[in-house]
Image: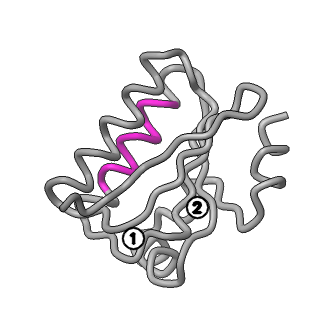
Amino acid sequence: MPSLFATTREYSGITLVDLSGRISLGDGSALLRKTVRDLLDEGRTKIILNLGDVNYIDSSGIGELVSGFTAVRNRGGELKLLNLTKKVHDLLQITKLFTVFDVFNDESMAMRSFD
């Protein structure tokens, strides 16, 4: 059984990726990497990762978030995070990455931030 599931929704040029499960070494981080790379290959560079249903993330998952962020930035786009669980929020603060990402708790505010 896959450890991570991803579904994408598109609104006026912004892609929302709803993630659920675990972003960890193996399946989870690989799926996150593939999802972001596929979106970039399709020319989609305004990406919001909805992490509301991600119950676990390890260091390789954090690494994937950072490399996804970098890949999107290198294409002139933006990758933002939505609905962090307390665990993921705390992990980003501990690793000093909280300041790197634009983080939102409200989907419509995240969407408007691209304007």
* Disc marking residue 99: 2
Front residue of this view, candidates 40 and 96 = 40
Which quadrant is the C terminus positioned in? top right
Residue 48 lies, with reference to residue 56, above or below; the image says above
Majority secondary structure in the magenta region: helix
* Disc marking residue 95: 1
In the rendered image, residue 98, in percent from the top left (x then y), is placed at 54, 65
Confirm whether the magenta stretch covers residue 106: no
Front residue of this view, candidates 87 and 21 = 21
| Occupied quadrant, residue 15 | top right
* Disc marking residue 58: none
| Occupied quadrant, residue 41 | top left
Q: Secondary structure at mark 1?
A: loop
Front residue of this view, candidates 55 and 79 = 55
Read off the magenta span: 63-72
Residue 76 lies, with reference to residue 84, above or below; the image says above
- Amino acid type, residue under disc 1 in the picture: Thr
In the rendered image, residue 56, in percent from the top left (x then y), is placed at 34, 75
Instruction: Identify the residue at image location x=75%, y=51%.
Output: 110
In the rendered image, residue 63, in percent from the top left (x then y), is placed at 30, 54
- Amino acid type, residue under disc 2 in the picture: Thr
Confirm whether the magenta stretch covers residue 66: yes
Instruction: Identify the residue at image location x=83%, y=55%.
Output: 109
